[in-house]
Amino acid sequence: MSADSVLPSWRPGATRDAITRFLAAARSVPREERVACFDNDGTLWCERPNYVQYEFFVDALRRRAAADASLGDRPEFAAVLGGDAAEIGALGLDRVALALAGLFEGLTPDAFAAEARSFMDTATHSLGRAMRTMVYRPMLELLDALRALDFTVAVSTGGGREFVRAVSETIYGTPAELVVGTGIDYDVVRDEGRVGLRRAARIRGDVNEGAAKVTNIQSQLGRRPILAAGNSAGDGEMLEWANRGPGPHLALLVDHDDATREYAYASRSETLAESEAITTTATRRDWTIVSMANDWATVFA
Amino acid sequence: MSADSVLPSWRPGATRDAITRFLAAARSVPREERVACFDNDGTLWCERPNYVQYEFFVDALRRRAAADASLGDRPEFAAVLGGDAAEIGALGLDRVALALAGLFEGLTPDAFAAEARSFMDTATHSLGRAMRTMVYRPMLELLDALRALDFTVAVSTGGGREFVRAVSETIYGTPAELVVGTGIDYDVVRDEGRVGLRRAARIRGDVNEGAAKVTNIQSQLGRRPILAAGNSAGDGEMLEWANRGPGPHLALLVDHDDATREYAYASRSETLAESEAITTTATRRDWTIVSMANDWATVFA
């Protein structure tokens, strides 16, 4: 198959060549070692101006606050409802995110998934498109090309595992068990005499960023990826872990350099013990840079 | 397809009828809800006279002690090498198991898996058969029948997740990501300038028994099973969780009542807040009892 037919939204060039070389070489890899892991925010779907999950949380907060105005008294919620970025920063994003996740405390997994799906079915991005279409078409083509080669294609998100799972099958063709992420904890309860689950207001395990992406993928999936894709410092360890070994391997770094069609912003690699532009790190570490402006003929699905 | 052709090692009767009724009804269930979870020890493979993983640990300890006699000075290892069940009980099985797991501290995931596979390729069970064949043929047929209906078929073991993963593809056709179990933690290291993993001597998360089977399955797989199979009290919550809802569901409890072909022993359901024979619990809770003596025409693979 030619790259034009398998990866039609990728422009010809060194990046597409690196991908097609990897795909060709992967045919010689044992099937159980054909594993690929993709970061989600900024790698598979747009993360600006806000994370999709944050928009979901804010939407849920607004609806709940409309029914119960006292919610606005809580400082985290007041800052979010007021769009007060400085106050959110002062409180700390982790604290705000945990407060927002707590809005769903007590829900069954199914009830939470239904709320997430309803949001993705109806929300609009500030660029004017349906939120569910803010997914990168070239990456969807790559997911399909990998699956056509019998790859196990996983998503490893720094965001909420349960939120991404609710929509991953529809949006990416990825079943729940292949979504790794920051997990919520559950309480085991009895309802109507049967065992059931309720969401707790607690993170389960580690926030899925940096080195935790490596240990979480190993723990949940039990296999090392030979292709990894990311766009920020929190993906660094995952990219390095994939980008090794005697066999075929590929680390892709999406560079958001397209202010016309999406956004232009530089991620800095603080967690890699050097503060430098992530693209500098990428070059030094032999990652393949995907320039949104140059390598993608079409951006969105 | 008739039950004779799909489940040839199952004898005709109420148990096989319950399974075939479930399989027929599952055709109406949405594909993403077709999830089945099987306990491992005593449900998919033989757990007597010792857990397979315990035999693996003892074998590894013997080989290491042959090279380094000082290992025998450690009380946990002295008790194991001496086959001193009373002393193992006095020390506590958890402590002994953690000490044995610690034999593999510092190994890469691949090196550990290679050692587990080598054991399973060569070990012999005390009944005289190859260890890798101490798997229940009727259950393998059920796994295949479920996969033929596009079920996601997972294993949820109280034992070591990494040990079962090393052999699950070969023995059960189950990839690593569909094995839930008691996990080992990893340290992230740099070797030859690349990110790598080393086994730590720490359990990661909860021991996968009882209610933890439910939260661990939800966390790792993200989906609730509608069929669950087990054989002991530690499977109770998982069975109850699967055995609910308006749609088709089935909870199977393997009763080891076959002293002629395998073993006869009764599990007691202490963790269900009542001390009673697990078969009594099964009847009260509407689980389907699988009598090894009566329902299985052939036991082993």
Image (cartoon, coloured by chain):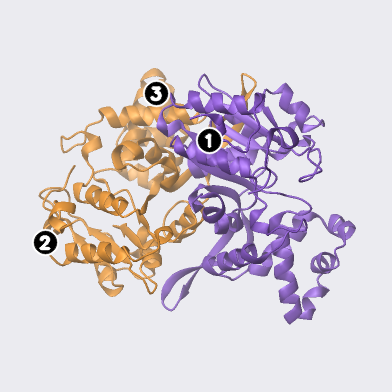
Chain colours: A purple, B orange
Tell me how far mark 2 sits from mark 3, CA to CA: 49 Å
Image coordinates of residue A288 in percent, x first then y, are 66, 27
Q: Earlier in the sequence, mark 2 or mark 3?
A: 2
Tell me how far mark 1 sits from mark 2, CA to CA: 50 Å
Label 3 sits on residue? B64
**Residue A58 in the figure: left or right of residue B163:** right
Quarter of the image for residue B35 reads: bottom left
Q: Is residue A4 above or below residue B181?
A: above
Q: Are marks 1 and 2 on the same chain?
A: no
Q: Which mark is in front, 2 or 3?
A: 2
C-beta proximity under 8 Å, tags 2 and 3: no
Say which mark, if any, is on residue B12: 2
**Residue B219 in the figure: left or right of residue A278:** left
**Residue A29 in the figure: left or right of residue A298:** left
**Residue B250 in the figure: left or right of residue B257:** right
Image coordinates of residue B178 in percent, x first then y, are 42, 47
Image coordinates of residue A221 in percent, x first then y, are 49, 42
Q: Is residue A287 above or below residue A82?
A: above
At 15% from the left and 55% from the top, the residue drawn is: B10
Quarter of the image for residue A236 reads: top right
At 53% from the left and 35% from the top, the residue drawn is: A6
Under circle 1, the secondary element is helix
- Residue B195 appearing in the image: no
Q: Which amino acid, mark 3?
A: Arg
